[in-house]
Image (cartoon, helix red, strand yellow):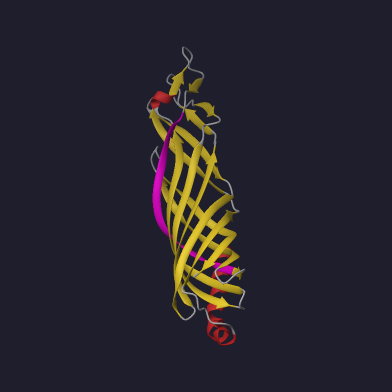
């Protein structure tokens, strides 16, 4: 949240100074642009999946902690100058990660009430997280010189998240008679949640022109939202998507 606030305030200051800067700096004369960047999402995300399973007239409790690590993502964008130094564009980014979490459960005893038995399944197996987003960007381009340009941008982001989840079914549980003091688990029941939600993006992009058409540059931005995922064992959990991002790569003007 602090990162979002700082970027937003910085962008507002940039836009507030834009009319004065326009009189002092060069005009943006390009028709449009393309960018091709490799970015990094430095923060990790974590959430806990909790569910229950009715068995022996009691409820088994099942817990799966998830950790989404930091990592790289691809980002491409394109846009056009609309009026003077104002422009509009669209960007697409995709981030993915894999994890092998641990499942823990408290399984009721068929012979004794309120005497659950603990079971651990580790590693659970490979679960995948995919975040893809389309970012609409309204921008103000400030050419500082013939070589250097800075753009401030903001707009809505349309996120889609696919998250691997896990729980237990009755067929996954293997009893050990005759005492039933222990219980084992064959495997977990794995599923995939698929949810979409609108968030925001705000940030800055800088370009150094090597030629009239090509250059290199970098960006910093906040782009993200929070999404509620439906759990296979019932209920929902809230996960954070995106976050602070930075990256760089090729810049093309036309």
Residue 148 versus residue 112: which sits nearer the camera?
A: 148
Read off the magenta span.
188-206
Q: How many marks?
A: 0
Residue 134: percent from the left, percent from the top?
43, 59
Is residue 137 something that shows in the picture? Answer: no
Image point (58%, 46%), residue name: 69
Indicate the quadrant where residue 53 lies: top left
Is 181 situated above or below 107?
A: above
Q: Main secondary structure of the magenta part?
A: strand
Is 166 situated above or below 93?
A: above
Residue 132 versus residue 148: which sits nearer the camera?
A: 148
Quarter of the picture holding the N terminus = bottom right
Q: Residue furthest top?
A: 178
Residue 173 versus residue 224: which sits nearer the camera?
A: 224
Image point (44%, 52%), residue name: 227
Is 39 situated above or below 19?
A: above
Image point (53%, 53%), residue name: 74
| Residue 28 highlighted magenta (yes or no) | no
Image point (45%, 20%), residue name: 174
Residue 35: percent from the left, percent from the top?
52, 63
Residue 75: percent from the left, percent from the top?
51, 57
Residue 140: percent from the left, percent from the top?
51, 75
Is 172 situated above or below 77?
A: above
Is residue 140 something that shows in the picture? Answer: yes
């Amino acid at each position: 949240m602090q990162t979002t606030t700082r970027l937003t305030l910085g962008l507002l200051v940039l836009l507030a100074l834009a009319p004065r800067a326009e009189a002092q700096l060069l005009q943006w004369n390009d028709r449009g642009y393309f960018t091709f960047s490799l970015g990094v999402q430095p923060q990790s995300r974590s959430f806990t999946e909790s569910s229950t399973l009715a068995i022996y007239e009691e409820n088994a409790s099942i817990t799966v902690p998830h950790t989404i690590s930091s990592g790289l993502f691809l980002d491409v964008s394109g846009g056009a100058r609309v009026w003077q130094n104002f422009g509009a564009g669209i960007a697409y980014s995709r981030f993915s990660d894999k994890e092998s979490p641990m499942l823990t459960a408290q399984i009721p005893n068929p012979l004794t009430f309120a005497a659950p038995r603990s079971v651990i399944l580790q590693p659970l197996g490979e679960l995948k997280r995919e975040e893809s987003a389309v970012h609409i960007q309204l921008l103000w381009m400030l050419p500082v010189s013939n070589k250097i340009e800075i753009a401030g941008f903001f707009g809505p982001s349309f996120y889609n998240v696919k998250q691997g989840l896990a729980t237990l079914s009755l067929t996954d549980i293997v009893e050990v008679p005759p005492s039933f003091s222990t219980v084992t688990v064959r495997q977990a029941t794995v599923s995939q949640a698929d949810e979409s939600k609108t968030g925001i993006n705000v940030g800055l992009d800088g370009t150094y022109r090597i030629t009239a058409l090509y250059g290199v540059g970098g960006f910093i931005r906040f782009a993200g939202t929070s999404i509620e995922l439906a759990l296979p064992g019932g209920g929902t959990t809230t996960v954070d998507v995106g976050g602070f991002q930075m990256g760089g790569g090729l810049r093309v003007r036309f």
